Each structure stands twice: as C-alpha cells, then as structure tokens.
C-alpha cells in the first residue's frame, strides 16, 4: 500500500489519538494520516499511558469523557511526568459550554475542540499547536545554550557508526524520510535508529538529539 505520508512539511510528526468511539477514531486517524501524520490510537487513558511508557508523541488528541480513565485524569498524569509534561494536548468534547472549555484548559489542555468538528479545523489546530511547541523548544534550546547548560546524557553512551551518521543528519535538520533517501534505507529503519538513540541517551525527541550532537561536536 503506498504511503500517505508524502507531505514534507509534517516532518513525520507522531500523534497519539485517544477516544473510546471507534468510528471517530477511524475517521480522525484516516484524515490525519492522509495529511501526512503518523497516528497511534488508544481507547482510553490507561491504554494511552501504556503507550506513553514506550513512545513519546509530538502531540496528544484526547476525548474528555472516557471509561477507565477520563481525559482530565490522563492530562493530569501527563503534566506530572517530566518525560511528557511538554507535549501539546488537544481535548475533544461534546460539551461546548464556556465552563467546560475553561475546565478543560485549566486542567492542562492546550486546545479544546467541540464535537462535531470539521476535519480541516482539527488539522489547523494540530498544526498550530505543533508550531507553537516547536517555537518554545527552539527558544528553550537557545536559552539553554546561552546559559551554557549542556544536554545531559549517560557518560557510557556509545553509538554505532550508522547511528552516528543518522544523528549528524538529524542535527543538519533533515527529516527521517530525507535521511532514509540519503542512506538508501527505509524510513522505518531510520525511525528505529532514532528510537534506539533516544533510549540510549534518555533524551525525549529529535530536537534534543540534534542539540546533543552539536554540543558534543558530532555534527
């Protein structure tokens, strides 16, 4: 099946979609994947937390009312964990009263969307949140470099020759797709190398990997 992830602007952003309505999951997942995003799905908050143990998405889209663990409890857990506290969260809710919106935003969500919604608006909100997160990350990186605060990784980290090549290209700002083409391997292979390096270094995302590569004079 041909990949739908052909939009280079998305840079293979990974979204976690949490909702107990299988129809909504199907529709939203299809639409977001068609727009070039990678989407993982969960049926409730507990399942989402299990996924977050293994992988860190660029954004979480989450229903408010769910069995097992609702959206409020999930966001509370996400905001308390240093690994996930920075992730932008969008709430999806059938409740559109202003007090519901206020509660959602006060709980820690960044965006509150009322069902039913237009898919185009959902994508616009996702893109806006990701851009904002990226701006904050760049600002934080710049501030940290100005403060001479270097990225901390375990002292015994050893990269394979291929991982070293990949991290150098990440530091140059190349997307996984572009790195795969350059090294003549599959995009999935590059994603696997990036994931392995994140595990080895205890870093959270490609931005931190790139910073570490630059600070360590690997790039």
Image: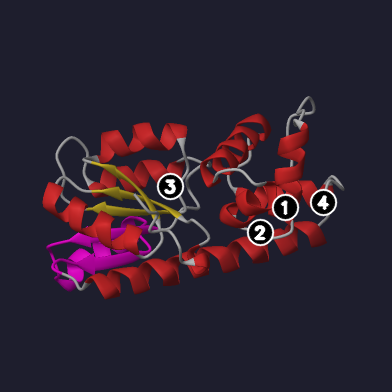
Near-viewer residue (71 or 47): 47
Tell me where the magenta segment starts and ends, as one range.
Answer: 89-116
- The residue pinned by badge 4 equals 219
The x, y position of residue 45, in whole percent, is 27, 40
- Chain-order first, disc 4 or disc 1: 1
Q: Tell me whether circle 1 and circle 3 mark residues in contact (CB < 8 Å).
A: no
Instruction: Give the alpha-carbon distance from disc 2 to disc 3, as whole Å.
Output: 30 Å
Instruction: Give the alpha-carbon distance from disc 4 to disc 2, as whole Å.
Output: 12 Å
Q: Nearer the viewer, mark 4 or mark 1?
A: 1
The x, y position of residue 33, in whole percent, is 34, 58
**Visible in this render: residue 150?**
no
Q: Tell me whether circle 2 and circle 1 mark residues in contact (CB < 8 Å).
A: yes
- The residue pinned by badge 3 equals 79
Instruction: Give the alpha-carbon distance from disc 4 to disc 1, as whole Å.
Output: 8 Å
- The residue pinned by badge 1 equals 169
Q: Nearer the viewer, mark 2 or mark 3?
A: 2
- Chain-order first, disc 1 or disc 3: 3
**Visible in this render: residue 19?**
yes
């Amino acid at each position: 099946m041909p990949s739908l992830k052909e939009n280079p602007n998305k840079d293979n952003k990974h979204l976690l979609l949490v909702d107990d309505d299988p129809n909504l999951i199907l529709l939203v997942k299809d639409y977001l994947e068609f727009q070039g995003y990678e989407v993982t799905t969960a049926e409730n908050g507990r399942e989402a937390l299990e996924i977050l143990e293994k992988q860190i998405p660029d954004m979480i889209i989450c229903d408010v009312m769910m069995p097992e663990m609702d959206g409020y409890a999930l966001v509370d857990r996400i905001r308390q964990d240093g690994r996930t506290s920075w992730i932008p969260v969008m709430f999806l809710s059938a409740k559109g009263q202003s007090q519901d919106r206020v509660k959602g935003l006060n709980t820690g969500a960044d965006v509150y969307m009322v069902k039913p919604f237009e898919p185009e608006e959902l994508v616009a909100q996702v893109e806006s949140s990701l851009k904002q997160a990226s701006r904050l990350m760049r600002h934080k990186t710049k501030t940290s470099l100005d403060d001479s605060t270097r990225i901390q990784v375990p002292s015994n980290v050893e990269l394979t020759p291929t991982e070293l090549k990949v991290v150098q290209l990440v530091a140059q700002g190349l997307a996984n797709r572009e790195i795969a083409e350059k090294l003549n391997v599959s995009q999935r292979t590059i994603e696997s190398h990036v994931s392995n390096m994140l595990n080895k270094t205890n870093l959270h995302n490609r931005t931190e990997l790139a910073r570490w590569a630059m600070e360590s004079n690997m790039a």
